[in-house]
Image: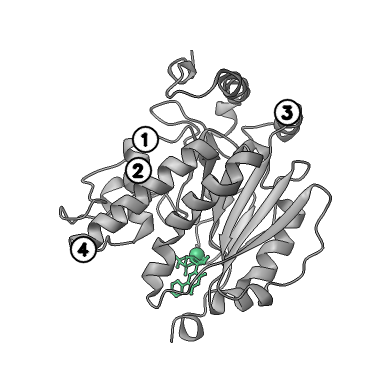
Amino acid sequence: MRHQTSLKPTNNLPVTREVQLRQSITLDDKLKFGARQDVQTFTSWEAPIMWEGVFDPLLYDQKHLQLQSSVALTVFAVGRYLDAYLKTFLTSAEKHFMLGLPVAYYVFTDLPEKVPHIELAPQRSLKVIQVKKYSRWQDISMMRMKMISEVIESEIRHHFKYVFCFDVDQEFQGRFGSEALGASVALLHAHFYKLPKDRFTYDRNPKSKAFMETGDFYYHAAVFGGLWENVKKLADACYLGIMEDKLNDVEALWHDESHLNKYFWLHKPSKILSPEYCWDKRIADKSAIVITRLVWAPKHYDTLRTP
Ligand code: 5GW
Ligand code: MN
């Protein structure tokens, strides 16, 4: 029986939320794991890996409408990333992200007055939160964990069931819908899902809190999410690791992504998104990619990363 173990409550969620959680897990039980023979569709701990073909989108939409699921999305657009990426990210999200469910965008920026005005569909809202611009880009990236935790605590937990956290340098091009919702959701990194474990770029420095010898998958920090309770725990743990590393004068190889990989190694995600949910069009081997739902925007390191 699939998911038998995940039916046991793993933490002390209030009863109604536990019931809701069981219902959405039941939904994952209806997946057609055999519909894709070319890829791995569930993990050793029986979490589904969401590839096109294994799920029925309408079934998920129906269920989540019934459950009154709601989703907060966090995105950071600091410095030059605002002009370069935010408008495309938001306008494309309006076309493809969780259509039919209440959605709130939380945009973190140092330039609130420059956030573009976007016409939002009903039941969708946008809130701008001002943050300071850290001078090191590594810090801009890492400090997201702290801000995410804070906004969950101050706002999201009171209004939304799920939180999804995104890099801004990407564009939605296909459905990114309620099938992606789950208790704790990680994304397979497009550049690593076909590589053997020994090629994964985990942090290998024993002095870092992100150190790991081996793992399950290489997850991409450009997309992660889940129930707000779980995303808050993840963000807190990653932030703690980042700060402890700073005290010890070390920095993990891939910054927040290294800490995220460590977290998901210790706390297995309940659902995994295939690279169809965050694809890099420069990758030549597209054989497993049936649909691109979200794609990496072109990078202009020369103009974006110089002071
Ligand atoms: C700037 C220079 C180097 C690295 C990051 C930044 C940067 C990141 C920035 O100046 N402003 C900013 O808002 N960010 C946020 O951090 C964006 O949401 C961005 O998508 C995220 C992660 O940084 P990326 O996208 O450059 O990282 P990779 O791993 O996708 O290359
Ligand atoms: Mn990015």
CA–CA distance in space, label 4 to label 1: 23 Å
Q: Callout 2: helix, strand or loop? A: helix
The coloring applied to the image is: one colour
Where residue 3 is drawn, which disc sits there? none
Q: Callout 3: helix, strand or loop? A: helix
Where residue 253 appears, as percent x and y from the top left, is 28, 62
Mark 3 vs mark 1: in front: 1
Q: Are marks 4 and 1 in contact (CB under 8 Å)?
A: no
Q: Callout 4: helix, strand or loop? A: loop
| Three-letter residue code for mark 2 | Tyr
- Mark 2 = which residue? 263
Q: Which residue is more in the foreground, 203 or 33?
A: 203
Q: Are marks 1 and 2 in contact (CB under 8 Å)?
A: yes
> How would you rate the neighbour count of disc 2 (Cα within 10 Å): few for under 14, some for 14-19, many for 20 or more?
some
Where residue 31 appears, as percent x and y from the top left, is 60, 26
CA–CA distance in space, label 1 to label 2: 6 Å
Q: Is residue 74 positioned above or below 212 on the image? A: below
- Mark 4 = which residue? 250
Tell me if the residue at label 1 has its CB under 8 Å from ligand 1.
no
Residue 277 seen in the current view: yes
Residue 226 occupies which quadrant of the picture?
A: top right
| Three-letter residue code for mark 3 | Leu
Mark 3 vs mark 2: in front: 2
> How would you rate the neighbour count of disc 3 (Cα within 10 Å): few for under 14, some for 14-19, many for 20 or more?
few
| Three-letter residue code for mark 4 | Val
Residue shown at 33%/39% (left/top)?
265
The numbered mark, 3 or 2, whose residue comes first in the sequence reads 3
The numbered mark, 4 or 3, whose residue comes first in the sequence reads 3
- Mark 3 = which residue? 59
Residue extending furthest toward the front: 154
Where residue 267 is drawn, which disc sits there? 1
Mark 4 vs mark 3: in front: 4
